[in-house]
Each structure stands twice: as C-alpha cells, then as structure tokens.
Image (cartoon, coloured by chain):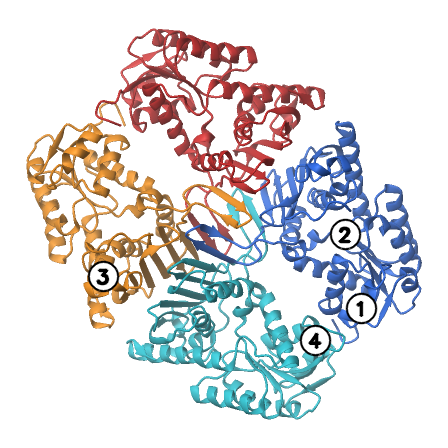
Chain colours: A red, B blue, C orange, D cyan
Amino acid sequence: MSATKKIIRVGLIGAGRMGSFHATSLAQRVPGAVLAAVADPVPGAAQRLAEKLGVERFYSEPQAMLDSPDIDAVVIVSPARTHAELVVAAARAGKHVFCEKPMAVTLEEADRAIAAAREAGVVLQVGFNRRFASGFAAALAEIKAGKIGTPQLLRSLTRDPAPLRDPTPIPPWTIYLETLIHDFDTLLHCNPGAKPVEVYAIADALVRPDFKDKGLLDTSVVTIRFDNGAIAIAEANFQAVYGYDVRGEVFGSNGMLQIGNINVNNAVRYTAEGISIDTSRQDTDLLADAYIAELTEFVRCAATGETPRATGEDARNALAIALACIASVQQNLPVKL
Amino acid sequence: MSATKKIIRVGLIGAGRMGSFHATSLAQRVPGAVLAAVADPVPGAAQRLAEKLGVERFYSEPQAMLDSPDIDAVVIVSPARTHAELVVAAARAGKHVFCEKPMAVTLEEADRAIAAAREAGVVLQVGFNRRFASGFAAALAEIKAGKIGTPQLLRSLTRDPAPLRDPTPIPPWTIYLETLIHDFDTLLHCNPGAKPVEVYAIADALVRPDFKDKGLLDTSVVTIRFDNGAIAIAEANFQAVYGYDVRGEVFGSNGMLQIGNINVNNAVRYTAEGISIDTSRQDTDLLADAYIAELTEFVRCAATGETPRATGEDARNALAIALACIASVQQNLPVKL
Amino acid sequence: MSATKKIIRVGLIGAGRMGSFHATSLAQRVPGAVLAAVADPVPGAAQRLAEKLGVERFYSEPQAMLDSPDIDAVVIVSPARTHAELVVAAARAGKHVFCEKPMAVTLEEADRAIAAAREAGVVLQVGFNRRFASGFAAALAEIKAGKIGTPQLLRSLTRDPAPLRDPTPIPPWTIYLETLIHDFDTLLHCNPGAKPVEVYAIADALVRPDFKDKGLLDTSVVTIRFDNGAIAIAEANFQAVYGYDVRGEVFGSNGMLQIGNINVNNAVRYTAEGISIDTSRQDTDLLADAYIAELTEFVRCAATGETPRATGEDARNALAIALACIASVQQNLPVKL
Amino acid sequence: MSATKKIIRVGLIGAGRMGSFHATSLAQRVPGAVLAAVADPVPGAAQRLAEKLGVERFYSEPQAMLDSPDIDAVVIVSPARTHAELVVAAARAGKHVFCEKPMAVTLEEADRAIAAAREAGVVLQVGFNRRFASGFAAALAEIKAGKIGTPQLLRSLTRDPAPLRDPTPIPPWTIYLETLIHDFDTLLHCNPGAKPVEVYAIADALVRPDFKDKGLLDTSVVTIRFDNGAIAIAEANFQAVYGYDVRGEVFGSNGMLQIGNINVNNAVRYTAEGISIDTSRQDTDLLADAYIAELTEFVRCAATGETPRATGEDARNALAIALACIASVQQNLPVKL
C-alpha cells in the first residue's frame, strides 16, 4: 500500500450474524478499507452494529446508503433472495459490489446482476471464500499449473458444525443454493476449462427428519460429470458433531491434492483417552483468514479496477449446478446441464 | 493354539500372482496351516510354485486335488469366472472353502455356491480382506457399537497403483466385479442392518481411453442409497501414480470415522523438496497383514467350525450392487435393487 | 473496538528486515494502531520505509522520535545490543514499549529496563511471538489448567530455514541470546511456577564449520533442570533445508501436548514422488498470525493499561538461562542458576 | 524358503511375559522355526508354557536344554543379569544365540559373550527390535544412503505405557540398562560411522517419587556428543498415560527423518469430544511386527550363517553409553567415553 493509495469507503448491507462479522473485519482488519456506513431494514439493527464498531452512519433503507456519493463500494450480506436485486441497485449507483453467495437464485437474476455490473463498470465479487483459504488457493494454483495432470475424480464437502440451528426459517433448497454452492464453485475451479454436463443429486432430511415435510433437506450427495470425463462428488450435511468440516480432494492423472483439515490450531493432545485436536465450532473460525482475504482482495480490486478471483460469472456457473440438483432431486434422475 | 490343535491341510487352486502370494502365506505365515498341495491348469505353474515352497504335491487338474482325502480345505485363487463352480465342487468334496472375490459373477451362481457349502456343512469364506485390516476392523467394531450413531454419509475408494498393467486381458466390468466389490462390501458392513435400495453408477476410461471401445472402464463413481437414508459413495480408478490407495469414511449422527492411510512405514522424510512418506506400490504390500489375517481366520474356522466374518452371503450382497452398477451404466439411470 | 476507543500512535525504531515487517503490520493489519513515525540511524532507511507505507514522519535519530509528544508507544526492532538502552529511553519519555527479543543481553541491563518501565508506568512487552501462535497459546492454556498434570519432560526447538544467511555479521552467542531465547521462554511458560535450577549446554558450528573460529555457533542442545523435577531440552540449528521449524512437546503426568507443525497451508500433495506439503521458507511466514497478534495485544494494552502476556520479567528469566548456557559451553559443565 | 530349507529347532530360556510372547511367535509365526523346547527354573513355568504351545519338551534347568543335541539355536529371555552367562553357555554348547537386551550389564561380560560366540562360530543376535520396525529400518536405510546428509541432531525416546507396574522388583539403573539401551542403539546406528565421545545424563523418580530412595529412576534425559559433531538426545519415562511411545528424529545437513507414530491402527475417530486415534497399551502391541521380524532374521541367519543386523558388538556399544550414563548421574557431570 503506497502513501497515495486510495482508501475505499465501504457501506455494508445486512447486520445479521455474517453481516456483523464482515463489518468487524472491514472496520478493523482489512487494509485500505473504511467501514463508512451500515444498512439493515430490521429496526435498530444497523444502529447497534454501527455503534459497536464506531461507524457514524447507519440506514434502515439500503437504497439511501447507495444514494450516498461518498460510498465507494458495498458489501451485501442480506438474505439470499435479496442479493441479485441489491447487486443491480448498487451497480446502478456506481458502487463496487461484494455480494455474499449465492449472488442470485435464478439464472435470469444472475444474468441481470452480471449485466448491471458490466454496464456500470464496477467490480463484482462473490463471497466464495474458500478460494481465499490458503490450502484451496495453493491447490488451485497447482492444478492450473498442471502438477497433478488432468483431473479425473474430485470431491468437495461441507459439513456444518453442530448443533443445527432452528431449521424453521431455513428456506427450501438451501442445501444447494447456500451450502453446496461453495462446493460447486470449488469443483468448477479445480477442473479448469472443463464444463459440467450432467448432475445427479440425492437429498434427505437425516439430521431433522421431523422437518422433512416442511421442505428441509439437510443431507445431500451430488455427482457431476464434466465434459473432460472427470467425475465429481459434492457432499453436504447440516450437522457434524465434531465441528465445521470443509475439505476437498482432486485426483488426476499425475497425482492428488487433498485440501482442508479441521483443526483450528497446531496443538495435538495425548491423554489417557487418546489423541485429540481442537476443531472448529463455527464457520467463521475455521476459515477466518479466508474471510479477511476475500474482503482485502475486494478492496484492492475496488481501488485498482482489477478483476477479483470470484466473479459474477463464477456465481452463475455454480448456480447452474445448484438448480440442476434441484431438478434432479425432484425427478430422481440425472439432469443434463 | 493348544498342543492338540488340529492342523488344517490346505490345497490351493491358482498359481498366478495372488495365488503365489496366498500360497507363500499358507506355507510360512499362517498358524495351524500346512500347504499340502497346489493346483493350476497352466502347464508347469503348479509344479513351479510347489517346488518353490517345498510342497510335495501339485496338480494340473483341481478336481484331482479335491478328490484327495487328506486335504481339509481349499483356497481358490483362480480367475473370477471359475470361482463359483470351484466353490461348488470343493464343497461337494467336503472341503472348507476360502474363495477370492468375487465368489460369483451372477446371483444364480452365488446362490448355488452358498447352497453347496450349506449342504456340505463346510466353511465358506470370501476374500474381503479389508475386513481384516486393523483400521477397517476397528472402525467396524465402533460402528456396530453405535459410537458414531446412525451412518448418514459413507465413502469407500480403491485406487490401484501405477502403472496400470496391460489392460488387454481385463474382462469387461472388472471395475465393479473385482475392484469395487471390495468397496461395496465395506459400505455394506459399515452401515449394519441397512439395505441398499438404489444405485447410480458412472464409469469411463480415463486412464486408458484407447481401450474404451474394448470395454475397459477404469474409473467409476457409484452412489448407493440405503433404506435407512444413508447415502454412500464408492470410487475406483485403476492408476494412482502415488501408490495403492484404499480408504473409507463413515459419517454418522454422532461422529465420523476415517479409515486407511497409504504410508507403508511410519517414517516421515523432510528435505529441501518438502515432506514425504513412502507409499505402497502394490496391493499385497499395503494390506499385507490383512491377507495373513483372513487366511488365519479361515484356518481357525476350518478347525473349529466357526463362521468366518466374510461369508458367501456377504459375497452375494456385494455382487448384487455390482450387477446393479452395470445396469445403471448401461442405462445411465438410477437402478433399484 | 468501540467508537470512542483510543487510537495508539506508534513510532517504530529499526527499519531492517524485521522492522519493515512489523511496520507493515502496524500500518495495515493491527487494529487500533496508527504507524506515526519510523526511526533508523542508517542513512535513508527510515525515509524509504516511511514512504513505502505512507507514513509522514521519519527520523535518523530515535531520541528525536521519543521526544515527540504525539507518539504513544514505540516498537523497538533495532540490533539486540541496543535494546535495553532504547527501552529505558522510551520509558523515560513516557512511551509504552514493545521490544523485540532479547530485551537485554545482561541481567543488569534487563533490570534497568524493567525498572525504567515500572517507574514510568508504561507497558513493557517483549517479542516472544510464539506465545501468540494459536497452537502454543492453546497448549499453554491447557497446561495451566492442569490438563496434562505436572510437566516431566519438555522440548522446544528452533531450526531456521535454509540457506543460512552470511554468518559474518552474526555476533557470538547469537544462538542463545537471539534464537534459543524463544525456546527458553516457551519452556519456562510451559512449566508454570517452576524455576530452572541447572543448565547444561553443548554447541558447535556444524552448518558452517569454517566460521567456528570466528565464534559462530550454529547448533546447540541445552538441558534444563527445573525445581519441580522436570527436565527440558532446547535445540537450535541455523539451517534446516526443509524450512523453518518451530515445535514444542510437553509431557506430563497426565498427558502430552505437541505444538507446531511446519506446513504453511492445509493442502497435501500426492505424486509419483510421494506425499508432500509446503513448508515455510522464512520465519515471518510460518508465524505470520502470531506477529500480528503480539502487536495487537501490545496496542490493546497500551490503550487499556493491561499487562501483556510477555513482560520484561519474562525477558529477564529467559535471558538468565541464555547466560547460563554461555557459561556452560565455556566450561563444558552443568551450571547452576 | 526352498523345499530343502533347513528347519531351525529353537529352545527358549525364560517363560515370563516376554518369554511367552517370543515363544508364541516361534511356535506360530516365524517361518523356518520349530519351538522345540522351553526352559525356566521357576517351578512349573516351562511346563505351562510348553503345554500351552504344544511343545513336547520343557526343562527347569537351561543347561540341560543346551546339552540337547537336537536344539540348533536358543532364544534367551531370562532376567537381564543372567544374559551374558547364558550366552556363553549356549555358544559353548554350539547353539546359535538370540539374546534379549541387554546382552550384558558390564563391558567385561559383553566381551566374554562376544568372544564365546566368535570362538564357537555361532550366530549372536541381540534383541534390538526397533531396527526391525519398518519405519526405523526405512529411516536407517535412508541415512546410510546419505539422503539426509550428515546427522547433526538426533533424538530417540521411549515412554512405557501406563500404569507403571509395581516398581518393587525393578533393579537400579534399569532405565539405562534395559530401557534407554534401545535408544542408545538407535542413536548409534542412525549416526553411522560416528563414535560417541561424551555423555551427560539426568535422572529422577518423577512417576514414583516414593520409590526414589529405593533406587528407582523412572525419568531420564541423556545428551550424547559424537565425534562427528552430532548431538543426540535420549529420553525415557516409565509411564505415559496415552500409551507406549517410541519415536526417533534425525536431523542432518540435507534433511530430517521422523520415525514412529503411536497409533495401532489406521482409523481416526471424530466425535463431539474431538478427534482421536487408538494408541498402544503395551510394547508387544506397537512393535508387534518388529518382534516377529527380528526372530525371523535370527532363524534365517542360524540357517544360513549370515550376520544378523544387531550383533554382540552392537550390544556392547550401547552398553558403554548406558554405563557412562550411570557414572554421569552419580557425578552430575559429563562423562567421557
């Protein structure tokens, strides 16, 4: 960061759990950023978060913040179904946009968001934070460099830490649109240049079978065929008693990469009960550095105009797989993309 | 082994690579066994193996060995398609039978083999050696004891070491009938009491695409749904450049077990090139102890009449999945069992 | 950080490799800090660093910076033999002080530095960064909580990454005063409440025997006896071809803790050459988070008046062991403390 | 083993815990061996073991067994202080000798044993079983091949599993003569061609301080200087609550080897309590394969006249370090060898 580096003034939309987490990062840990304002329609939410972080401005109406000329960029952490519309509004207001995943829940929405950012000439980055985790980033670089040859078998999984929070407010198909969408992105970028051609998905409510008739699917296995022959598996489950578990494996003609371990420090304990390590009990813990890194990249791209490593197109590509999964579950058949 | 313990006189059928390996174990490392005879129709094969091991008798015709009254038990290591017939013949001759997997390649054959052993009152054990590998055995015991709750997601994989041998003589569907059949057995016994209800299989020739039109499938991913909701994945590939790779993972409501590592000793090397360990370059190396253990159990069961842990019924259950995979690949559809 | 939180204005002394690293952290990554000025007597060094980081003020004379009333705290990263004097000067100027290790090279110096900070009522923190590495911090918490019982055997080691830089400017006894002093601190705080009573040290020039007659000792093993019976080993070597290696092991009556691994991401690579991971090629890489964490704690303590976890007394205690090591090597005898 | 291979008829002396273990191996798991007789002066002990294993002959007097012409080789597993005398007697009787460690407790005894075997032209192997553990063997091969350059820092440790058995019958200095002697042998053969020149040992009774005045030392750290500059550490403790722990580390100019892990199978368990593996609760468990391998090598050497990899000279070299440790503890000084 040079002496003349532009400071990016960021407005954040969404003061919930993840919104508060990103806001704290922006206020304290992201070089080159100032958290200038917070917006949330929930009464009092924006004000509470703003005061906690020493931010002077807060809004109950995101558009009011978007209209403010001294905001350079926005970070969208609102509910998933509001994302695309907010991306479009922010882009039209000339703000660079970081949007949490999923950027959209239909392909039409995704196309509109991408087009709006392109037309406005603003940066559009999507919250695929795993790309910024050191292990995933190192693995991707090796795959792109051809170190393991042509990918043949891939695996990516997400298991959320226990206990599963109250599933009442979880919208249908969340497991694909909000959880496995991370894995789809990982699988896509770990098989560079290849296109998914067919998807087969199985899902069930194994953690909370009592919520199955309300549409909750908490466990899924997805098989994806790519046009280069590679076969990928994505797995998700909403409750791992041992902690947050995010891993990947890419097997190719010249080697394999395994990514992700679930210990949160590098101490190993040996007692009469055996050997143990500490695991992560929340997502923001295991991937803490990745969350900072993605925002740091966003702020840098907003300042320089560079293209971030996770774009609107990436969001659309992962979404296409998620939507195919939904169709596959509904039909219990493989679905072509 | 008490002073009065019965010594089991074993005849072995099949003097190829695995047959020679098992013969050496029986001659030198399996307590309570005497390798009494070897049979193989390939000219000179039985004699060469017999002489190498100091075994006095050898046969070019298995039936002649089966007719010999001083043979207590036979170990069948002939080509897969001859197994069931030999099991029936051995059982009818009153010999206890250890048969390499697959015990049969059709369900009718499997039923005949099981019936023959039952009628003859002989032990029938199948070569699912992973059950005897210490890690798999320990994991299975924990699963049966309920330590990880109800299985929800399972994975079992087999990757053969490089280089893939000449694929010319590999019969079609070998990947299911001879390779993944191990994984199917592992998945079945790691989800105790549950029945597979649907199978979806994808296969391709990624290692040797030039052999695809000859029917070679060298890479496959299989999804299996169980009646308790659990979803299992089986994966295979015929050429892992880093060595023989056999692993499992069972995720349940109360925890997860991971099974299998691929280092063949417990030394770790740190050099300017990084950190490295030694991997297995052949199957008989990584699971060496398991091969001895399964034969030791067979000899013990032959002496005592106990039921071995891998039976003809187990062979049939795994075969049913393999056959469903073949149908699934042919139709590119999920197939009900 | 609340809206009213005090921002700490930090002046940094020493614009060398580590000074530049800490300066960058202070400028960009330490919440609550502003890097207000840089001082270094080397012509041009302070200016270059200041300009690179967008810092307006720079000094060739540290005292001039200390005289500046708008500096709240100083971070001392100058050569080791200047530390104690600078600590005293900074404390007398009323600045909170963070001093890189060793804080002093004689016990008298250490006492003067401690006394100066006490009299001035300023925070005095020493750069024992390992205490801030997540694994070491977790282990220490467990030891203090009695989880592994009474420590009986301890080990701490430091191996610097290859290649060893030009040893010409390395002062005699650096291996104790600047390298193993980290390990002595680790061992002291991993055996809480116990006092070292006897030290035996062996040292040699094995990496660069050609520099032995110039006083370079690049390899050492130290045995420390504590008054609770525990026996500790500290090891150092100036050139590990496989990367920077910092580890600890504490064995107690109820268990053991192992601390530290040397991979810098969580990806594991499997190729025909074996299995490998990436190691750290410089100290600021492996312990990157710990360096930020120690400065973050310093800034927080400067703002709140809290006592940091690594104090001047800790520096003195570790130094006492280092000095005993020097005596032990000179006499080739155990030396009482 | 060829058809004409000589079968070695082994007589075993000592029917205690380890004697029974070796006897079982010889009777059931060592190719080419027949356990022909068992001797033990404890009334009934030899007979009980012989009957359990189906061995026809048993003796209360070892010499009677040694006089028997149809015994080819003896395995000595009696109390340590009887070893050397029995080696001499066996050699004079023309028997090949495998002797548990320590082969002798004075250098004079060691020399007599070595001379007796040499004069009789019999094989003399000592029970340094770690050399036969796959990890240690692989590491030694790499060191000898120069893969890690010149050794500079070495470590070998032994921690016995909990609980410490009744220390009443443990003779003084057992920790050096019977426990650390394994580590001394490991360190000697991991620094090939180098000679130990100085030893410094610290010991205490930390596990059972109430037995300290009876001469029990249950914890020790030993520093060994070699003539090539390498510095080695040996550590022992009689009670590790987490299981039997045997490890080594060899750091050289071109790399490091770490040897030994303490899990007894390859399953890893993840539960709400963390991640855990199973450890070994007795020595014969962790190194089970090594015990078989050393006896297999002995029987092979007895048949072929080859020199085993752990000889009487190796026993003497390790004993010299053990005796220097005793002197060092008595004087609390470094002791030259």
Q: Amino acid at mark 3?
A: Leu
Mark 4 Cα shell of 10 Å, populated few (<14), some (14-19), many (≥20): some
Disc 2/disc 3 C-alpha distance (Å):
65 Å
Residue C111, x across and y down, in percent: 12, 53
Residue C321 to residue D293: above or below = above
* Cα separation between marks 3 and 1: 66 Å
In space, the residues marked 3 and 4 are separated at their CA atoms by 57 Å
The one nearer the camera, C266 or B45, is B45
Give the chain letter at badge 4.
Answer: D
Task: Give yes or no for contact between labels 1 and 4 (Cβ–Cβ under 8 Å).
Answer: no
Residue under pointer 1: B50
Badge 2 sits on which subunit? Answer: B
Q: Secondary structure at mark 2?
A: loop
Q: Which residue is mark 2?
A: B310
Question: Residue drawn 72% across and 77% down?
Answer: D5
Q: Amino acid at mark 2?
A: Ala
- Please tell me how crowded label 1 is: few (under 14), some (14-19), or many (20+) other residues with Cα within 10 Å: many
Q: Is residue B69 left or right of residue B20?
A: right
The answer to whether marks 2 and 3 mark residues whose Cβ atoms lie closer than 8 Å is no
**Co-location on one chain, circles 1 and 4:** no
Q: Secondary structure at mark 4?
A: loop
User: Which residue occupies 70% across, 58% down?
Assistant: B291
- With B34 as the anchor, is D30 left or right in this view? left
User: Can you identify the residue that label 4 sits on?
Assistant: D32
Q: Residue at x 64, y 24 (%)?
A: A197
Query: Label 1 amino acid?
Result: Ala
Q: Chain of mark 1?
A: B
**Does the residue at mark 3 contact the one at mark 1 (Cβ under 8 Å)?**
no
Q: Of the numbered discs in the image, which one, if any, rests on residue C216?
A: 3
Q: Amino acid at mark 4?
A: Gly
Alpha carbon distance from label 1 to label 2: 28 Å
Circles 1 and 2 in contact, beta carbons < 8 Å: no
